[in-house]
Amino acid sequence: MDFDFTDDQQALRDAVRRFVEKDYGFARRQQIARAGGFDRAAWEGLAGLGLTALTVPEAHGGLGLGAVDAMVVMEELGRGLVLEPIAQGALIAPAVLQQAPATLQQDWLPRIAGGEALVVLAHQEARSRYRLHRVSTRAVDARLTGVKSLVPAGDLADAFIVPARVSGADDEPGGIALYLVERSATGVQTRPYSLHDGSRAAELHLQSTPGQLIAGPDAGLALLELAADIGIAAQAAEAVGVMERYLALTVDYLNTRKQFGVAIASFQALRHRAADVKMQLELARSMSYFATLRLGDQPAVRRRALSQAKVQLGNAMRFVGQQCTQMHGGIGVTDEYIGSHYFKRLTVMEMQWGDTLHHLGEVSARMQDTAGVFA
């Protein structure tokens, strides 16, 4: 199998890396984090680079690129610790809206492609515990009532993709539909806050709020699962970028910091720890590729593969973050040093889209034929 990237993908990688290095340095990121974790000018810069149009079909003004191109972009955004929710607004939202009625596609996809509209998925609830089918938000005659948590840039988004239950108990797999809810609609209230890594989120309160149907209860949960899997694959790629940059930063520190008159990189124990970190990074990279390449598979195969990837990525994020921070010593946890922000980002990502234990359970539940033993 050929894992080489095409010339176009390499050019895309270089363009995103140049943008991050030139226009999204650590000082600017700190300013954005202190201002709430989202900057409209930065979002417009990402849109000007074409990232908001990345997976939007050409018929709606987008570039019509695929999952591998998105993976390349997310790796580079991870290296720069970019706070703006490109995965939500440019990967998940277009994928979901492509399954919506034609009028919704025409209204929103061109605006998403141009960076004029930010649409995010609002699916988490306080009692869901990562279970996508656990939905208590209710829809009656296309009017939604409920509360969603941890909505990315929720107070600044132009619209939300909201799962709501039209029938059944809160934990039944069936009866879930997806709706598009505009932030300007009646009954919408948001409460913004910053996450541990500096990114922006909000609580979303809906009270008899009108929504436009994207997918009915016959297809709602399946489309929500696809959205989550796209989010996991995007996050896996982003995490690889974060870990790669944090390891490089740590190696530079080991080669610079001196004790007993020599660089601490000469100490065998630290060299072994750095090698272990590199091994975890490469395992994570391979599982990121695996996750991206499985997005086009049948739902059952795709869901198991993405959970497998999240387990490996979760372990790697925790290990790399902790080891690199420990090798830095005290400076590794100071807010003024960029290394601490890589650690914070890895810590938050390990908990998003289902933590490691949740996905370990998902993998176990899907290993019915082999019981986890491969012959």
Image (cartoon, rainbow, N blue to C red):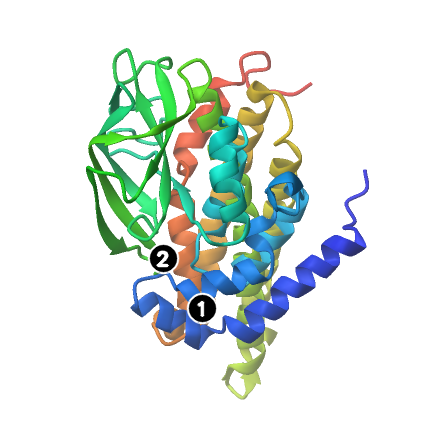
Question: Which residue is at 50% across, 70% downward?
Answer: 24
Question: Which residue is at 35% across, 14% downward?
Answer: 175
Q: Quadrant of the C terminus?
A: top right
Q: Mark 1 is on which residue type?
A: Gly
Q: Looking at the image, can residue 309 be seen? A: yes
* Mark linked to residue 108: none
Q: Which one is in front, 350 or 228? A: 228
Q: Looking at the image, can residue 229 be seen? A: no
* Mark linked to residue 339: 1
Q: Residue 247, how many percent across, how many down?
A: 56, 64
Q: Is residue 233 above or below residue 142?
A: below
Task: Please report whichever mark, 2 or 1, sits nearer to the chain's N-terminal start.
Answer: 2
Q: Is residue 71 above or below residue 364?
A: below
Q: Which one is in front, 139 or 73? A: 139
Side of 136 relative to 240 (left or right): left
Q: CA distance from mark 2 to mark 1?
A: 16 Å
Q: Is residue 81 above or below residue 154?
A: below
The picture quadrant where one finds residue 1 is top right
Q: Residue 351, how many percent across, how many down?
A: 38, 43
- Disc 1 crowd, CA 10 A, few/some/many (<14, 14-19, 20+): many
> How many marks do you count on the picture?
2
Side of 286 relative to 315 (left or right): right
Query: As drawn, which residue projects farthest toward the bottom?
Result: 261
- Mark 2 vs mark 1, foreground winner is 2
The picture quadrant where one finds residue 248 is bottom right
Q: Mark 2 is on which residue type?
A: Ser
The residue pinned by badge 2 equals 199
Q: Which structural element holds mark 2? A: loop
Question: Which residue is at 46% across, 60% downward?
Answer: 43
